[in-house]
Image: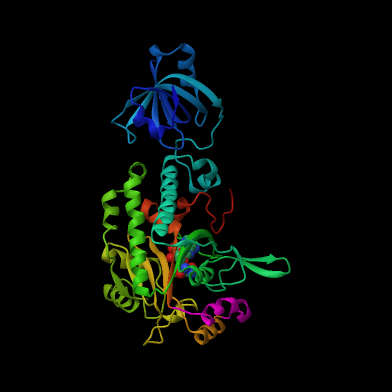
């Protein structure tokens, strides 16, 4: 008899197997007990029939408590009524770990309660499905960029630079110096691109943003590719191929998880169709003004959630918004060749109200321009000399972008709130557990 995982049940129909599981729920009558089981690979049902097992086992099946762990031994059968498609008819149960008064009962709980018990709440079905998809997106990311010829190039977490502005920095001490938690690995990726052509980083980033929205985390994970000898248009093509590839990978490998989430694969399928529409910031402003729903929108202001939602809904696909006003974007973006009020950049807005999932740009290459911008941004010139060296020694056109992993996970899984897209979310008022 083999010890297997639930996910492999399909290969063991009518065979006797042993599986290590936890009990998520149960119901029983005088003659039969139904145990809802999970092992971290899938959820399925165990059936214990009184007449087929010893009295001791049937009593155990009736008394086993939520989240107790055990080995079950029995025969796999098809079960067309369940999402999973298989069940186990149990002959024997070996209790492993007890669980008394599990705090999360199958009844409804409030968000704060569930977030306080996140370490346990992660065991439930939706969270399982979201974390599996998150893991799959990370795997697909490495595979995609590997196939595209990128080098994985890690950026530091403790830094002296502030690529995305000084207002959202987490300050810390680095012995006798000031340091910050990284907001973005981009500046280091630019050094990487000048050394190895095409690089990407994947790591945690931090924003001390005082915003409490369903799209903002204080600590989030970002994928940041950076490409030498690449202009904006080619970068946009890479971005849309990457996003379509992520969605397709989930469709190929996560059908069970999508079912658990009730996420319609047909809707996701649309997002694999390329190209994604591109509109300029100027056009976006006009579109919003024409709709009549956004009286406050005027040229020069950044978009908020409602504006981003409207724009992506308008196209019912992810949409690139190009060339934002210089005044609302970071210092490193390439100035427009014929207009001095906009920069060569693009945000990718996800449909269904999920907002910006990618921010990217072509990078300024001119040393003097960058020196000016660093000064204007109120940054300390000395801290950026290494960055300016990249312009002093063989500067080339180059572009890059950042995908917020949790934004992508929230969108693809159809979750309401970004806190569900990361195992232990760091939110404005939460650093526990
Ligand atoms: O637009 P952002 O700030 O761009 C950068 O950091 C660039 N340096 C990236 C680059 O070009 N290499 O952030 C990029 C993405 C956003 O589009 C969004 O998906 C995500 O990071 N993001 C957040 N996700 C969760 N919570 C937050 N507070 C986020 N801030 C940005
Ligand atoms: Mg942005």
Quadrant (top left, top right, bottom left, bottom right) of the N terminus: top left
Toward which corner of the image does residue 340 lie, by quadrant? bottom left
Q: Is residue 325 above or below residue 249?
A: below
Residue 11, position as x, y percentages in the image: 35, 30
Residue in front for this viewpoint, 232 or 310: 232
Q: Is residue 284 above or below residue 262?
A: below
**Apparent side of residue 273 relative to residue 211 in the rendered image (left or right):** left
Residue in front for this viewpoint, 392 or 140: 392
Q: Is residue 216 visible?
A: no
Residue 369, position as x, y percentages in the image: 50, 86
The magenta segment? 378-396
Residue for point 60% across, 79% down: 385
Q: How many marks?
A: 0
Q: Is residue 152 above or below residue 162?
A: above
Q: Is residue 296 above or below residue 10?
A: below
**Apparent side of residue 176 relative to residue 207 in the rendered image (left or right):** right
Is residue 390 shown in magenta? yes
Residue 65, position as x, y percentages in the image: 50, 27
Is residue 373 shown in magenta? no
Residue 265, position as x, y percentages in the image: 29, 49
**Apparent side of residue 178 relative to residue 219 in the rendered image (left or right):** right
Q: For the stretch drawn in magenta, what is the main secondary structure? A: helix
Residue for point 37% across, 74% down: 232
């Amino acid at each position: 008899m083999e010890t297997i995982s639930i996910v492999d049940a399909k290969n063991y129909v009518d065979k006797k197997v042993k599986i290590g599981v936890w009990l998520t729920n149960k119901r029983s009558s005088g003659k039969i007990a139904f145990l809802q089981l999970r092992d971290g690979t899938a959820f399925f049902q165990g059936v214990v029939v009184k007449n087929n097992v010893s009295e001791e086992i049937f009593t155990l099946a009736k008394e086993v408590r939520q989240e107790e762990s055990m080995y079950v031994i029995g025969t796999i059968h098809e079960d067309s009524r369940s999402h999973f498609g298989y069940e186990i008819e149990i002959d024997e149960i070996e209790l492993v770990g007890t669980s008394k008064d599990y705090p999360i009962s199958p009844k409804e709980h409030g968000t704060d309660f569930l977030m306080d018990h996140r370490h346990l709440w992660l065991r439930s079905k939706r969270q399982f499905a979201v974390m599996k998809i998150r893991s799959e997106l990370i795997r697909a990311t490495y595979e995609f960029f590997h196939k595209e010829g990128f080098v994985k190039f890690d950026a530091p977490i403790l830094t002296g630079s502030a690529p995305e502005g000084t207002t959202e920095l987490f300050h810390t001490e680095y012995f006798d110096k000031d340091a910050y938690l990284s907001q973005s690995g981009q500046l280091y990726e630019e050094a990487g691109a000048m050394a190895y052509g095409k690089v990407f980083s994947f790591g945690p980033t931090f924003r001390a943003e005082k915003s409490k929205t369903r799209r903002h985390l204080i600590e989030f994970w970002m994928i940041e590719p950076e490409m030498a000898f690449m202009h904006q248009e080619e970068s946009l093509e890479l971005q849309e191929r990457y996003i379509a590839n992520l969605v397709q990978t989930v469709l190929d490998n996560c059908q069970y998880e999508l079912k658990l989430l009730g996420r319609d694969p047909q809707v996701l399928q649309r997002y694999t169709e390329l190209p994604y529409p591109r509109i300029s910031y100027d056009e976006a402003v006009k579109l919003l003004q024409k709709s009549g729903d956004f009286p406050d929108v005027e040229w020069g202001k950044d978009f908020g959630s409602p504006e981003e939602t409207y724009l992506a809904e308008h196209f019912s696909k992810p949409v690139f918004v190009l060339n934002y006003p210089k005044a609302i974007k970071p210092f490193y973006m390439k100035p427009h060749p014929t207009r001095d009020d906009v920069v060569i950049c693009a945000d990718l807005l996800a449909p269904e109200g999920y907002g910006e999932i990618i921010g990217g740009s072509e990078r300024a290459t001119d040393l003097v321009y960058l020196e000016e911008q660093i000064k204007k941004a109120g940054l300390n010139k000395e801290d950026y000399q290494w960055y300016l060296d990249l312009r002093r020694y063989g500067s080339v056109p180059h572009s890059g972008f950042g995908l917020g992993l949790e934004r992508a996970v929230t969108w693809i899984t159809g979750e309401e709130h970004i806190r569900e897209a990361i195992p232990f979310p760091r939110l404005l008022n939460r650093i526990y557990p």
